[in-house]
Amino acid sequence: MGFWIADTLKTPLSTAKWHGASSFIIMAQIEKYDVIVIGAGPVGLLTSVCLSRWGYKVKNIDNRPVPTATGRADGIQPRTLEMLRNMGLKRKIMAADPARVYEVAFWDPAPGGKIIRTGTYPSCPSFIDARYPFTALLHQGLIERVMIEDLEKTGTTLERPATITRFETNNADPAYPVEVDLKNLDSNVITTYRTKYLFSGEGARSFVREQLQVQIRHKDPISYVWGVMDGVLRTNFPDIKMKCTIHSDHGSIMVIPRENNMVRLYIQIASSTDKDFNPRKTATVQEVQAAAQRILQPYTCEWDRVAWYSVYPIGQGLADRYTLDNRVFMGGDVCHTHSPKAGQGMNTAFHDAVNFAWKIHHVESGFADRSILETYETERRAVAETLLNFDNKYAALFSKTQQAQHGDSTAEQQAQANQDFINLFKENCEFTSGFGVAYAPNILNYSLSQSLPNLPSELHSLIISDDNARLRPGRVMPNSNVTRVVDANKVHLENEIPFNGSFRLFVYAGSNTSPKPNQHPLLTTLSNNLLKPGSFYSHFMHHNHRQLDTHHDSNNPHSPFFSVALTLCAKRPEIKIEELPELFQAYRDRVYADDAFNEPVLNATFGSHAKVGLVQNDSGEQADAAVVVVRPDGHLAIAVRLTEDEGTTKVLQAYFDQFTKPGEWDGKSGSSRTSTYYNERGQNRGLHGGTVFAKASL
Amino acid sequence: MGFWIADTLKTPLSTAKWHGASSFIIMAQIEKYDVIVIGAGPVGLLTSVCLSRWGYKVKNIDNRPVPTATGRADGIQPRTLEMLRNMGLKRKIMAADPARVYEVAFWDPAPGGKIIRTGTYPSCPSFIDARYPFTALLHQGLIERVMIEDLEKTGTTLERPATITRFETNNADPAYPVEVDLKNLDSNVITTYRTKYLFSGEGARSFVREQLQVQIRHKDPISYVWGVMDGVLRTNFPDIKMKCTIHSDHGSIMVIPRENNMVRLYIQIASSTDKDFNPRKTATVQEVQAAAQRILQPYTCEWDRVAWYSVYPIGQGLADRYTLDNRVFMGGDVCHTHSPKAGQGMNTAFHDAVNFAWKIHHVESGFADRSILETYETERRAVAETLLNFDNKYAALFSKTQQAQHGDSTAEQQAQANQDFINLFKENCEFTSGFGVAYAPNILNYSLSQSLPNLPSELHSLIISDDNARLRPGRVMPNSNVTRVVDANKVHLENEIPFNGSFRLFVYAGSNTSPKPNQHPLLTTLSNNLLKPGSFYSHFMHHNHRQLDTHHDSNNPHSPFFSVALTLCAKRPEIKIEELPELFQAYRDRVYADDAFNEPVLNATFGSHAKVGLVQNDSGEQADAAVVVVRPDGHLAIAVRLTEDEGTTKVLQAYFDQFTKPGEWDGKSGSSRTSTYYNERGQNRGLHGGTVFAKASL
């Protein structure tokens, strides 16, 4: 295998590189892909972006001829912003000048048919400790455009308008088991392709899901009809630039500020709990504007323009399965639909895409066993379920609050409904910001309850994840500021390793009293054991296969699957990279001094250690040494104390042995297309000499 | 006047707007401009950007056919970064991923012909309190491209290659007194133009300066020959990503990190203090590389590629005059040349451009008297003089240090030379970061020594600038964080008013114990007095001339010449914009709560007040009320205590009466082209309904 078919080549034959063969054979006239992605909304595009950057051959289609022109999904939550920054996409999105929601205002009925602000609450309160404690709001098309530009850099193109008409996993070609028919909607020509994986990001109406006969379960029989309108509104309503939930005697509305002086209004037009519910009930722009004017009185309302308007029924549904055979996968709205009120749709879709992409990458590159693909559904479906449970309560309370104001309920009942709504909002801030996501224990996320196979029980005591609330596997790595030794830059440690598909080993050296801090035995031991032949780390090293030029490769000097960052309890000038143990010298750009200013642990001597709980108390001057393993998507995997013997490496070995492929790594047979790893600054770390990415059988 | 000539119109006649006339007359066949700018390097381009944004008709030419491809000026200092952010240009520049220099390392000779790091020092130490305490390094072409893109948005284009062949201020057309011949270097056609102003940003070799017979005075007879090389270097020298000055037994070198893994080396090839000085001495790439290898030993040196290389003599020169007639002006390298070692050239050029542009704008729009143009030369020439004095000492010490290592000097003399060099560097950090610039007292910068004309002496006591070290006129406004009331965003107060050509009135409300904080008498008095007919503020209001739609105009609801920002000592939810006095309601998007976290005044109750010295001590809970007047370029003009009577407004009136034009403002006769004010987020604040900019006689 490993040969491309002539007609699939993007580049002329003369410039293509062939491995292990001096000639090639036309095997078939059918075009083959690593992944075919249906749908160029958020989930489809981000899936394509990730896999294209890592060198996979991707085909992405969409049945719309052009990207979203206006409206639709618009809220990017704090955790998603961090992830986009880690992928080097945030700056371009922020350049569109999205509105930023820091606080939510709650408005309730006041005497005389008026409304009054009863309180405000941060949208991402300070206890969450987010780098970007706000929601960024801009229309979906602007976000799609950033991703399409990124795709173009990698050479992957979108075919649009095109649709999927047939697919089956028939194993006719075992390397490309899925057969897919795509129809170009301009030419009406149907073409058959073969692919290793098919990913559906089609949205709520999914051909793939229907064909697979995967059921959507509705959490609740209640459904709603919503109107949504984007436009430029002139009003003296003081909170028009804030996110507001407004309950009045004349109805309820949600206000969301937008880019370019716009505002989005969500208005509930009907609920199946209404006496005369009609799921086809609709409302014109004028009716929604009139309703808004009634609700906002005594404030004025005058529309400069309306940019987008839509009425749609909302049902809360969750797909039973995200895949049946680990070849055809689904994500985003295909799998979960809910109300737009908490601004979660696009965010959940993005995280579906990232979760899917890195696991496919690890399997296809020969690093991990196919069994890790099972965790895509279990992890992402559980998040969707939590979201639907929240949305279910939130939507019901929104309606209940609305009903309480019209009818038989007492003032106390009404006040209680309002208060319940606000309480629910506050309780769920961590989840809606994205930082509450905690993947359950599995082979990727260590838990005491699932001890590591083949690891002596006494070594389990080195694992500190269970005792340390800041290092819970399945949750996001805490952020911290450090000083990069090589250039004295103040940097965000959690973003120093970009979204490059590698497991991240954050080594915290701890405070030690060794006379030679740069050569502390804990670090020397770790270095020696990781580099020892046969370790999980050295097993996947480039040098097993070929001499690579890694001089300028900051993140993957040894292996495409591991990136190491070392943080030392010392002042920057005291740290001498040339004296560090061998492993860390290779990561010279990833050595840090824990001497920077860190909120909220202002008094900590070693703030970065403190933020991951490696100190006894926040002002502690003693910090513990550990290696914190973080998955490619930024979620914690396991954290292990550093020892002066082989203990630490044995625990890590047992962790990785669970899912990495035994036997010789087939790095040699992979494509040597240079992969393009982008960091937040948009810099392509792969261009200078370095990052040559090996993949098994492209 | 006020008519454009048919052949000068950029838009078809049918879409052009005509004011005060129902027909038009062909007056001449000669094309007329508000400003003709010669040279599209940093100073020329930024001049064009500023004036084009404000709606002026600008022609910019350059004798090079394309922008700088590589190399040349590369250092953007902290204060310049703040200014670029205020202009909405910083994000695009940072997107090119410049290297960031936070610290400078000093290397000196060690035994055995080796070198050793003798110390490091911050490039912008924390006492300076900069938002961006680093130097950003990237090649001049990337910076030029950002400005050219900005020019294109405004419709101004560059003509290149083209050169100036003749000019004279002959007043043949009194409205366009300067006649200019420009020669297109492709077609060799010479065309005559008329312009109100000619600005030369030609660089060190200036036709305009020669024609004007303006002399360059050399500070010092000593001159130098420098080699400079940009490239990708493989080395195990640990500080290759830091700015370093290296003195070794084999010579001296300066190391500057660059974007894209590059490094710049400056090497002094000859000095006129050498015994065998030859100003035409040169060196090849190979010779410079060999010298670098000798100096850096025992570290390794291997070049992947060289991106740019040049050898040039450096003289320190300062032009006697920047203008002779206030019609033909010069700036940037035309007026001052010096060594590149402190990274000041482009920064000084940028500030020349900005200083020139806003003053031309204020004169041409009918706001200010022509006398303010005199301050361009006095302010900018004094800065250049300070720079040359510093550079003179710095270059001499660099050479002296070098000589000390070769020759007759003792070890003590050598150590002393090294130490003097480091001390000079440290002493000048404030100046080189750009925050040390302090324009001297003049009609724009108040000083006790030059009391305001026509102001009763007792009212001078309301002026607090003299007593307050943080509000010294002529210096840059201190930065601070506040919460914007309208949308609860955490923002940088000093950047809230973009570089829009307006004077900025920062009103600090102080801590008061009024039962109605939103209607405190101090604010009501100020509002009433500013809006009173005849005040300097109301004199230049739009409403004197026409009804303008200013609903969405955050920065200039009343006048193109003033922007107001109000900061209150209160928590955000306590502030009710609708209860504020009339003036501030118009600035609803520019009302702030002083409740945010501010470094370094962590303990201050009111951090923004504390940062401008309006508290008794940093933890003081009592804050004073004042209005701080800031020039359009961010430099402080005057600060006045708020009073419950007309005192404050009388002082402000006396300040503005010094240079604003008496008599009726001719706002009516101006062009009504919508101006484009960009803030850092790249948002065009002028697009939505609002900002219609009035100018006298375009």
Image: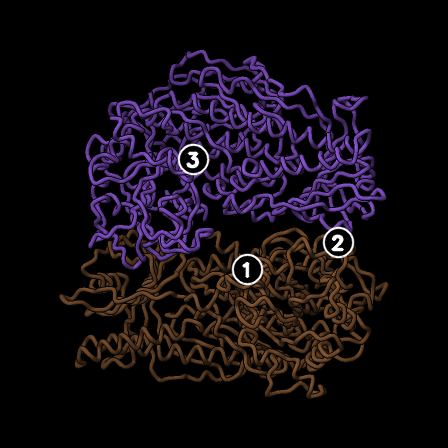
Chain colours: A purple, B brown
| Tags 2 and 3 on a common chain | no
On the image, the x and y values in percent for residue A688 come to 34, 46
Is residue A497 or residue A592 the one in the foreground?
A592
In the image, what residue occupies the spot 57% across and 29% down?
A: A387
Q: Chain of mark 1?
A: B
Q: Which residue is mark 1?
A: B85
Task: Identify the image quadrant of the C terminus of chain B.
Answer: bottom right
Q: Chain of mark 2?
A: B
Whether discs 1 and 3 lie on one chain: the answer is no
Q: Tell me what residue is drawn at x 38 percent, y 57 percent.
A: B258
For the residues bearing labels 2 and 1, Cβ distance under 8 angstroms: no
Where on the picture, by quarter, is residue A414?
top right
* Residue underneath mark 2: B689
Q: Which dot, 2 or 3, sits closer to the camera?
A: 3
Q: Residues within 10 Å of mark 1 (few under 14, many from 20)?
A: many
Q: Which residue lies at the image location 33% right of the left edge and 27% below the top edge?
A: A367
Q: Name the residue tied to disc 3.
A: A635
Q: Amino acid at mark 1?
A: Arg
